[in-house]
Amino acid sequence: MSVKNGAIKLVAGNSNPALAEGIAKYLNMSLAKAVVRRFADMEVFVEIQENVRGADCFVVQSTSFPANDHLMELLIIMDALRRSSARRITAVIPYFGYARQDRKPGPRTPISAKLVANLITRAGADRVLTLDLHAGQIQGFFDIPTDNLYASPAMVRDIREHFKLDNIMVVSPDVGGVVRARGLAKRINAPLAIIDKRRERAGESEVMNVIGDVSGYTCILVDDIVDSGGTLVNAADALLKNGAKEVYAYISHGVLSGGAVERVGKSRLKELVITDTIQPTKDVQATANIRVLPIADLIGEAISRTAKEESVSSLFD
């Protein structure tokens, strides 16, 4: 791939090697030779095994489970590149962990998203490329250019391939996700409904009301993160109780912690579609009603445009 200023290098951590390989394949290049391993006491060791002096380097690493290990890998890889005289370092973080801690929900609590943004910047990142941040304002936590990509174009293509659009209703599983759901609904010219829920404690949710008439519609829940799966399962039950024909879900990041995979598998959700920003586990791949939507081409195109100093935002026009 030709760029304006020198070679580009694609470096991968251990969080999602399959996605990194997919991005490299799209870009028609190989991943840079690098060792990212552990010492006996589990300290992270990194060695870049090829020349990166003057190169435009892109580090592909989601800060998914185990989040702290993968975050440290990202920081140390960038430090190694900076000390190896890389011209520019872009942290490509398909799933940005700690994003849900973007404000103080109570006294004496941290804003961890800001702390992580500071760590990434100080480690040597010149810019950040991520996908579907939990809250758009997190871009402002970084003091470097930050591109927040959207999975919606890939989701819209998939929806058009699998559904008849004349009987689809897009549903936001909570009030906070209305903007995201409305954007997707506009792309497929579908009506919008909202789930009003009350969360009593972290990881648990109680559906209170469905805002909108979903009777007779095939409903598609749209959100950025599925973690415990409780919100989706309760939302699906509420929609079916209110007359929906079937309920599907399109989610950007399949965190799926704890017993979430089993919970979704036993739920009344017809299908949960997640992208591969987080590497799917064997349990996810074996669950009949969970499907993985590849996102490597979108991220690869964004990397290509960044390297060529072309517009990234036009990907979503």
Image (cartoon, helix red, strand yellow):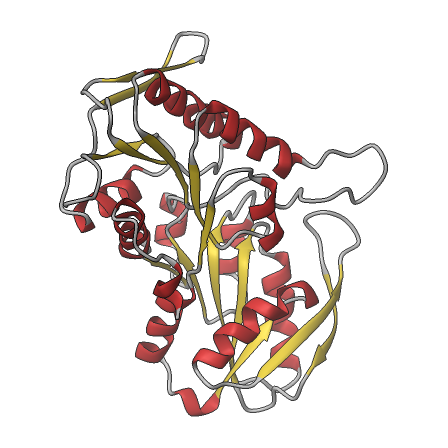
Q: Residue placed farthest to the right in the image? A: 107
Residue at (62%, 38%) from the top-left corner? 113
Vertical position of residue 230 compared to residue 154: above or below = above
Residue furthest front in the image: 4
Q: Compared to 143, does 1 lie above or below?
A: below
Name the one closer to the observer, 205 or 67: 67
300 left or right, relative to 263: left
Quadrant housing residue 191 = bottom right
**In the rendered image, is residue 312 in sight?**
yes
Residue 24 in the image: above or below residue 156: above
Q: Position of residue 135 (x, y in %)?
A: 61, 53
Residue at image position (30%, 49%) is: 309
Where is residue 14 shown, x and y percent of the image? Answer: 35, 30
Q: Nearer the viewer, residue 273 or 243?
A: 273
x%, y% of residue 121? 51, 30
Tell me if I can see residue 135 in this picture: no
With 194 as the anchor, is 143 left or right in this view? left
Near-viewer residue (48 or 274): 48
Q: Is residue 180 above or below residue 161?
A: above
What residue appears at the point 43 percent right and 92 percent down from the top-left corner?
A: 166
Q: Quadrant of the N terminus?
A: top left
Residue at 19% of width from left, 48% of height from top?
27
